[in-house]
Image (spheres, rainbow, N blue to C red):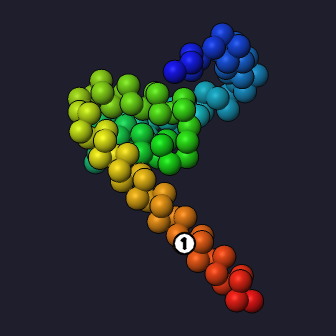
Amino acid sequence: MPDLYPDEYLKASEKFKQVAGPVNEAYKAWHTQAMNAGALDKKTKELIALGIACAIRCEYCIDSHTQKAKAFGATAQEVAEVIQVATIVNAGSTISYGIQALEHYDN
């Protein structure tokens, strides 16, 4: 796999943080609060985030949430099951949108 975080990306990321200022700080605070343990523990939240990251095809998110889930004790089997669930949800969504194609066809 090629380097996911090339120097150009890291530099642009730092520039964004500086330019976005308080909005970026608010996002970071929101992210921290949302990912803290609550009714769901941190591992579960990271596994949920990983499933969503797979479904929306965010390479950076997949990398980040996989590493964090692993750090919080997620097993390879749990990660595999998350991928399976994300795949099913994504496939179901495709079917739902595909049904609209049939509706358009009949009109």
Q: Position of residue 9 (x, y in %)?
A: 67, 18
Q: To which quarter of the image does residue 67 belong?
A: top left
State which quadrant residue 20 falls in. top right
Where, quadrant-wise, is the C terminus in this rendering? bottom right
Spot the residue most to the top.
7
84 to the left or right of 60: left
For the point 71% across and 13% down, the residue is 8
Q: Is residue 3 visible?
A: yes
Q: Is residue 36 above or below residue 71?
A: below
On the image, the x and y values in percent for residue 18 come to 72, 18
User: Is 56 on the left or on the right of 70, as rendered?
Assistant: right
Number of other residues with Cα within 10 Å of mark 1, as a class: few under 14, some 14 to 19, many 20 or more: few
Q: Nearer the viewer, residue 5 or 33?
A: 5
Measured along the vertical axis of the image, is residue 87 above or below residue 25?
A: below
Q: Which amino acid, mark 1?
A: Ser
Front residue of 21 and 42: 42
Residue occupying image coordinates x 29% and y 36%: 43
Task: Evaluate whether residue 37 shows in this view.
Answer: no
Nearest the eye: 86 or 15: 86
Percent across and percent down for residue 41 are 27, 40
The spot of residue 44 in percent (x, y) is 30, 42
Q: Residue furthest bottom?
A: 107
Picture layout, residue 59 above or below residue 16: below
Which of 100/1 is in front?
A: 1
- Identify the residue at image location x=24%, y=39%: 77
* Residue 45, image quadrant: top left
Q: Secondary structure at mark 1?
A: helix
Total tally of numbered discs in the picture: 1
- Residue on which disc 1 sits: 96
